[in-house]
Structure formats: structure tokens, C-alpha cells
Image (cartoon, grey):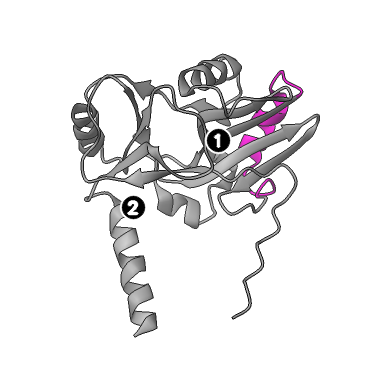
């Protein structure tokens, strides 16, 4: 059987770090916990005046989300790569994936930024997550509305997860302190899903449709 050719990735694209799924969030002081927002995984890439918005699979969606592009263009940097989640929120501030699918709200979609991979030509992926997060927070301190810092919490993972469930969020992502940014599936990032969130029901429906198509 011939080998399937590897897809050609666009210049500047970095394969994202993907969390491993877990039934329960990790515990202990060595973890940072973030809300998992229900949206599209997106990397805002900038080199000089050029901006791209890469999806998880390397497609450039800069023509779709103008608010994110404008905010990235206004940053006081020569270059950067910001990892995050493109979201559209309801009146309560909850990310609603259905609003992204409908395409009527593209102009108000913003990026919840949670990692910084490159800044002014310096590769930060080997730096611990605490350093990357501190650099990101400083970078976004005066950013326009298209870029917003996704805050983290240091504390008991189970408690953070319970609060996320009450709010109706997709779940949480827990990240090991001191960890580097590694492309592909990582055990240093742990995702705990809210089974009652729309994202979980959507994944169940998609799995059922895939199994049905194979039968």
C-alpha cells in the first residue's frame, strides 16, 4: 500500500499542542487551570505587517475574523505567534459555538489567547508555561478587543471544574507547571469535559454519524 503523502503546511504554521482527555481534572499545586471555551482553535501569526489566522489544520481564516486580525496588527511587536480559541459569546459572556457556525457574527468574534509561541523572532516554545503566560499577559495588556487573555487559576482542579460546569462552559484544560510547548497530543495538558455542555453533545452526535456512515 502506498504511503499517504504528508500535507504541505503553510509557511509559519505551527502544529498546535493538543490536550489529553481525562474523566477527572488533575490535582496538586503543579497545575494551572483554564476555562475551555467552545470555539475554533486558532493561531494568530504576524510577521511585520502580515497577519494570518491559522486553524488547527493549517487553513488561513484571516478573511473571516476581522476583529482578531485588526487587534493582532495593532500589537507593538515585529512578530508573534499567539495560540488561542476564536469564540463568539452570548449576552452572559458564554462562548456559543452555534453562533460561529451561523457566520452572522464573524465581525464580533475574538480570540481568547492562552499561549505565546514566538515573540519578535524569539522561539518561546522551550520556555516553561509560566514564562510564556507572563509574556502573553504583558503583550495583551493594551490590546484591542479582538484579543483577550484567557485567565488561569492555581488551585484545586476539581473545584475549578465544578465552577466551569455551573457556568455551562465546555470544561477546563489543566496545564503542568514548567512544561514546554510541544506540538501534537500532550500529557502535560489535560482536558476535562463538561458532559452536559453543547460541545459534548455535539461530539456524541458526530461520533454516532461517523459510526453510522461506516456501517
Q: Residue furthest bottom?
A: 215
Residue 94: image x %, image y %?
36, 38
According to the picture, the residue beneath numbered tag 2 turns out to be 199
The residue at the point 29 percent across, 63 percent down is 204
Looking at the image, residue 61 sits to the left or right of residue 156; the answer is right
Q: CA distance from mark 2 to mark 1?
A: 20 Å
Q: Secondary structure at mark 2?
A: helix
Number of numbered discs on residues: 2
Does the magenta segment cover residue 67? yes
Q: Nearer the viewer, residue 196 or 18?
A: 18
Looking at the image, residue 53 sits to the left or right of residue 102; the answer is right
Q: Nearer the viewer, residue 49 or 130?
A: 130
According to the picture, the residue beneath numbered tag 1 turns out to be 83
- Can residue 90 be seen here? The reply is no
Q: Nearer the viewer, mark 2 or mark 1?
A: 1
Position of the N terminus, as image quadrant, is bottom right
Position of the C terminus, as image quadrant, is bottom left
The residue at the point 26 percent across, 41 percent down is 168
Q: Write the start and end of the magenta stretch as one range.
A: 61-78
- Can residue 151 be seen here? The reply is yes
Residue 109: image x %, image y %?
54, 41
Looking at the image, residue 70 sits to the left or right of residue 20; the answer is right
Q: Secondary structure at mark 1?
A: strand
Above or below: residue 136 compared with residue 16: above
Amino acid at each position: 500500500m502506498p504511503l499517504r503523502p504528508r500535507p504541505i503546511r503553510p509557511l509559519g504554521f505551527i502544529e498546535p499542542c493538543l490536550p489529553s482527555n481525562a474523566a477527572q481534572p488533575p490535582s496538586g499545586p503543579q497545575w494551572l487551570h483554564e476555562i475551555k471555551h467552545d470555539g475554533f482553535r486558532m493561531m494568530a501569526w504576524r510577521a511585520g505587517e502580515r497577519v494570518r489566522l491559522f486553524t488547527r489544520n493549517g487553513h488561513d481564516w484571516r478573511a473571516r475574523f476581522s476583529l482578531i486580525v485588526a487587534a493582532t496588527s495593532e500589537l507593538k511587536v515585529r512578530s508573534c505567534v499567539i495560540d488561542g480559541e476564536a469564540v463568539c459569546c452570548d449576552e452572559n459572556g458564554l462562548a456559543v459555538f452555534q453562533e460561529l457556525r451561523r457566520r452572522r457574527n464573524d465581525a464580533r468574534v475574538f480570540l481568547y489567547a492562552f499561549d505565546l509561541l514566538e515573540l519578535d523572532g524569539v522561539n518561546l516554545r522551550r520556555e516553561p508555561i509560566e514564562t510564556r503566560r507572563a509574556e502573553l499577559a504583558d503583550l495583551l495588556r493594551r490590546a484591542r478587543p479582538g484579543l483577550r487573555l484567557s485567565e488561569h487559576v492555581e488551585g484545586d482542579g476539581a473545584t475549578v471544574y465544578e465552577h466551569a460546569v455551573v457556568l455551562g462552559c465546555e470544561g477546563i484544560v489543566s496545564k503542568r507547571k514548567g512544561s514546554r510547548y510541544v506540538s501534537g497530543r500532550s500529557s502535560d495538558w489535560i482536558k476535562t469535559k463538561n458532559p452536559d455542555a453543547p460541545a459534548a453533545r455535539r461530539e456524541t452526535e458526530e461520533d454516532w454519524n461517523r459510526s453510522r456512515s461506516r456501517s
